[in-house]
């Protein structure tokens, strides 16, 4: 897999205007669905994910396996309003490492949505799920700490296929956000949007790489759910900077 780190510089005003016109703006201003819609509108099947919109001068970062020339061709066909909203004139990308040394330490930052699927198919905050389980067995719910539940969830995400081990991780921010999602098509073929509330959590810490192949897959796939909507992109840096 040839992974690339891609960067765009969205214009917040133009992005908001595009989202309002296309009815894809979250009630609380979350831009994940709007960016998902725009990226798919411009790049189709090559729409990059996972991505992270950092805002300000940092822009939008994403991992992609598409060739830069192909991405630029798609960008050149975009409508003017989409081009302004995504900042397509500043599209850039560079090769990203796709081989890693076992045991290598790296600093990381990741924005995740720590949820689980319940038996009835709904998504639930893993913290609220843990509280519910404790209540059902008569345990002391007050001893359940949100940050620890989220960290345990994150450890499991990294550990899959022995991709990486978390050496330490700190919850930098937490909030509840409403994100837009499309419901199943109705009889008339239309899909109605609905706002779904859930946790938005940013972790920073240090990891140790396990399997090089599995770690590359983790980078390309992203962490947790809602990876096509601004969650799950694993940002890396030298361990001395974490």
Image (tube, rainbow, N blue to C red):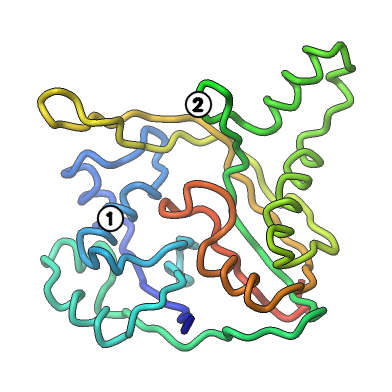
- State left or right for residue 235 relative to residue 2: right
Q: Quadrant of residue 186?
A: top left
Rendered position, 41 above or below 217: above
Which mark, residue 15?
A: 1
Query: As rendered, which of 8 and 16 lies closer to the eye?
Result: 8
Q: Are marks 1 and 2 in contact (CB under 8 Å)?
A: no
Apparent side of residue 171 relative to residue 229 in the rendered image (left or right): right
Q: Of helix, strand and loop, which one carries label 1?
A: helix
Q: Position of residue 129 (x, y in %)?
A: 68, 26
Q: Which residue is located at x 13 percent, y 31 percent? A: 189
Count of number-bearing discs:
2
Give me the residue at 24% from left, 29% from top: 192
Q: Is residue 89 above or below residue 182?
A: below
Q: Residue 177: x, y in percent?
A: 50, 36
* Residue 7 picture quarter: bottom left
In 3D space, how far apart are the residues under numbered discs 1 and 2 (Cα atoms)? 30 Å
Q: How dense is the environment of label 1, judged by Cα within 10 Å: few (below 14), some, or many (20 and up)? A: many
The one of 168 and 14 positioned closer to us in this rendering = 168
> Which residue is painted at 73% across and 51% down in the image?
156
Q: Position of residue 235 (x, y in %)?
A: 60, 69
Q: Nearer the viewer, residue 158 or 240?
A: 158
**For mark 2, what is the residue?**
122
Which quarter of the image is occupied by the C terminus? bottom right
């Amino acid at each position: 897999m040839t992974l690339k780190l891609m960067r765009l510089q969205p214009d917040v005003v133009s992005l908001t205007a595009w989202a309002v016109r296309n009815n894809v703006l979250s009630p609380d201003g979350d831009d994940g669905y709007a960016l998902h819609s725009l990226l798919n509108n411009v790049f189709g099947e090559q729409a990059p994910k996972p991505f992270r919109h950092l805002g300000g001068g940092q822009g939008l970062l994403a991992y992609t396996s598409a060739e830069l020339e192909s991405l630029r061709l798609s960008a050149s066909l975009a409508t003017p309003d989409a081009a302004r909203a995504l900042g397509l004139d500043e599209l850039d990308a560079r090769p990203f490492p796709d081989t890693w040394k076992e045991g290598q330490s790296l600093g990381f930052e990741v924005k995740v949505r720590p949820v689980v699927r319940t038996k009835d198919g709904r998504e639930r905050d893993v913290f609220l799920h843990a509280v519910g389980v404790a209540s059902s067995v008569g345990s002391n719910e007050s001893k359940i700490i949100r940050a620890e539940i989220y960290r345990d969830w994150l450890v499991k995400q990294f550990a899959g296929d022995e991709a990486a081990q978390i050496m330490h991780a700190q919850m930098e921010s937490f909030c509840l956000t409403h994100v837009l999602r499309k419901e199943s098509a109705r009889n008339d073929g239309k899909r109605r949007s609905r706002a779904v509330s859930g946790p938005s959590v940013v972790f920073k810490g240090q990891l140790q790489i396990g399997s090089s192949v599995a770690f590359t897959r983790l980078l390309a796939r992203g962490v947790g759910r809602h990876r096509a909507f601004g969650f799950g992109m694993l940002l890396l840096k030298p361990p001395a900077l974490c």
